[in-house]
Image (cartoon, rainbow, N blue to C red):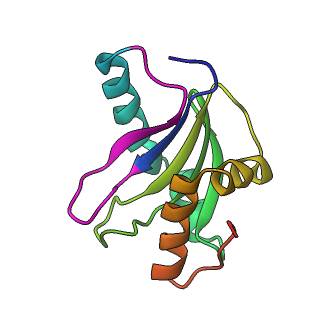
């Protein structure tokens, strides 16, 4: 994997499944990308993550997870099904909430995806 890789993990349009979209950096090969996607899809299986986000007034959380830092909603701008998520992940970096919000704000793709979640679910937009 390229150094300081930033990835969006979630849906990209209505009806799409979850997948990784590289924002910065990249993967060395498709096997690595598949392994990373499987790992990121597991994040909401951790009780602490689900509990913390569901009890947050903004329904947003930042967590250190396996290989880096995740910023996420357990919601999707494109569907209402359980297991949906909208996530930015910074590989190899242990960042705090303010740093992750800055990464999202500074990427038009991430900012649009996270802002769509805020609008759809009437949440405070942390990314303006």
Task: Return the residue nearer the eye: 6 or 61.
Answer: 6
Q: Residue at x 43, y 21 (%)?
A: 27
Q: Is residue 92 above or below residue 97?
A: above
Quadrant containing the C terminus in the rendered view = bottom right
**Farthest residue toward the front?**
108
Q: Position of residue 59 (x, y in %)?
A: 58, 70
Residue 117 x, y percent position in the rendering: 48, 71
Quadrant position of residue 67: top right
Q: How many labels does the image show?
A: 0
Please give the name of the residue rendered at 46% of the width and 57% of the height, measured from the top-left corner: 86
Question: In the figure, 66 relative to 126: above or below?
Answer: above
- Tell me which residue sits at (65%, 70%) in the image: 56
User: Which residue is outermost to the left?
Assistant: 15
The residue at the far bottom in this view is 122
Q: Position of residue 88 (x, y in %)?
A: 55, 47
Q: Quadrant of residue 36?
A: top left
Residue 61, percent from left and from top:
63, 58
Q: Give the range drawn in magenta.
A: 10-28
Question: With 102 as the anchor, is 33 left or right in this view?
Answer: left
Q: Is the magenta stretch mostly helix, strand or loop?
A: loop
From the viewer's side, name the closer residue of 43 and 103.
103
Whether 47 is drawn above or below 43: the answer is below
Look at the image and say whether residue 12 sits in the magenta stretch.
Answer: yes
**Residue 83 is inside the magenta segment:** no
Q: In this view, does 98 lie to the left or right of 76?
A: right
Residue at image location 61% in from the left, 50% down from the top: 107
């Amino acid at each position: 994997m390229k150094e300081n890789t930033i990835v969006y993990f979630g849906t990209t349009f209505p009806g799409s499944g979850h997948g990784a979209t590289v924002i910065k950096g990249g993967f060395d090969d498709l096997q690595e990308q598949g392994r990373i996607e499987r790992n990121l899809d597991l994040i909401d299986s951790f009780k602490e993550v689900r509990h913390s986000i569901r009890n947050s007034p903004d329904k947003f959380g930042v967590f250190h997870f396996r290989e880096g830092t995740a910023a996420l909603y357990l919601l999707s701008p494109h569907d209402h099904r359980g297991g949906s998520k909208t996530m930015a992940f910074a590989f190899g970096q242990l960042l705090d909430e303010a740093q992750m919000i800055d990464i999202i704000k500074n990427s038009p793709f991430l900012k649009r995806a996270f802002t769509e979640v805020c609008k759809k679910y009437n949440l405070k937009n942390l990314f303006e």
